Image (cartoon, rainbow, N blue to C red):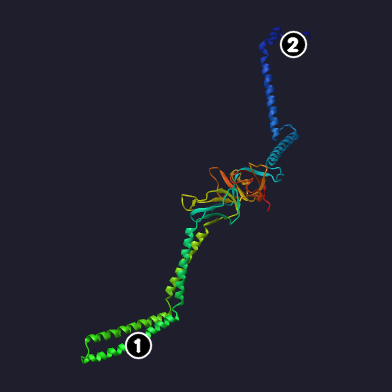
Amino acid sequence: MDDRVRSLRIAKEDRLDSQRPGSKFPWLVSLVLGVVCAWLAYRDDRLMSSIGFERPGSALPVEPVASATVTAASSKQDKASTSSDSTAAAASDKPASSNPIALESRGYVIAKHQVLVSPQVSGRIMSLNIEEGRRVVKGEILAEVERTEYQADMEQMRGVVMRNKAELSELQTGARPQEIAGATADLQEQEEVVSQLESQFKRLKEALKTNSVSMTEFEQAQSSFFSTRKRIDKLRQSLDMMKEGPRKERIAMAEAAVIQAEANLTKALWRLENCTLRAPISGTILKKNAEQGNLVNPVAFSGSTSVCDIADLSDLEIDLNIQERDVSKVFVNQQCEVRSEAFPKRVYKGTVSRLMPIADRAKGAVPVRVAVRVPDEEQGMYLKPEMSAIVVFFNAPSPQ
């Protein structure tokens, strides 16, 4: 027993070696490496369990993984609801739509119906009834152009029409009975004269055989007789033509002249009427482009070509450029909410009216138009043309 105990004792040299300072370093390094490996293994197992992956032979429980997934989903929903609530609060004090938001984009307000009012005749503006911001109704007088020249042209064309109509009426009516009677009397008179000349011609012809008359007298009688007979034939043809009436071709030419004169008169009247410039639509005057006394000419490069711009501010559109990656979220008749950046609390209902048939290559976007109706009492107040606006697109069609 004593021998066995002595064999288990550590020799003095070995105890001295273990007490040396460098003998503990390998043990410390091993301990640190073991702790690091254990921590890395623990982190890897937690990461796999958070994404729902379980190692073969792993004893991790399932419930913590499910709870972590539910917690992540609930946190995402909380963030989405918080974002939508903040957006609705920034847009309006009114309750937001219950439909989920598909997209939000920024665009510019434009007038759906905007007219550049230009005179159709040239001349000097004699009177002007235009002021920016004033609402006008269709047909209201906006300006007057000098009309002296156009009035004279109209009177001249009216005279031409009257003359051509008179000529046509004369041709269609034909000769009057008195004219026919006068031509008949002339014919009868010449017939009586020609009978006398014929008797004289025959008598001188017999006398010439006996040389009782000169050749000169005979020739004069012969000439008078034959010329009178030709005149009778001419008078007879003229009388027949007078009874028959004018040729159809002359009547057609007279009718064409009347049509041409009436067309010129219509043009002159049109020019005279266009000296008064009227509002083509009901709306608001956006811009004043001329002053009283200006020369206006719609086809010239110098001078004023228009007097004002008018737009219907109750029927507006928002011009947007939707990126190609988001255009699938937009469709025609989609429900929208529109608010201007200047008045974010004023919200208007809108509807996607159309997606343009061609994209913008430079912007990588598709132009979209959103129609907006503005109440009459708010026209030109909160939504003005060329203002920027924010449009919120919902995942629902607009109610009919």
Q: CA distance from mark 2 to mark 1?
A: 191 Å
- The residue where tag 2 is placed is 8
Image position of 156 with respect to 316: above or below:
below
Q: Position of residue 30 (x, y in %)?
A: 67, 19
Q: Is residue 26 visible?
A: yes
Mark 1 crowdedness (10 Å alpha carbons): few <14, some 14-19, many ≥20: few
- The residue where tag 1 is placed is 192
Image position of 44 with respect to 154: above or below:
above
Image position of 187 with respect to 334: above or below:
below
At a point 47% along the width and 74% down the height, the residue shown is: 169
Query: Callout 2, which amino acid?
Result: Leu
Image position of 201 with respect to 24: above or below:
below
SS type, badge 2: helix
Q: Earlier in the sequence, mark 2 or mark 1?
A: 2
Q: Are marks 2 and 1 in contact (CB under 8 Å)?
A: no
SS type, badge 1: helix
Q: Position of residue 24 (x, y in %)?
A: 68, 14
Would you identify the image quadrant in which residue 77 lies?
top right
Query: Callout 1, which amino acid?
Result: Glu
Q: Is residue 55 visible?
A: no
Mark 2 crowdedness (10 Å alpha carbons): few <14, some 14-19, many ≥20: few
Left/right placement of residue 365 relative to residue 1 reads left
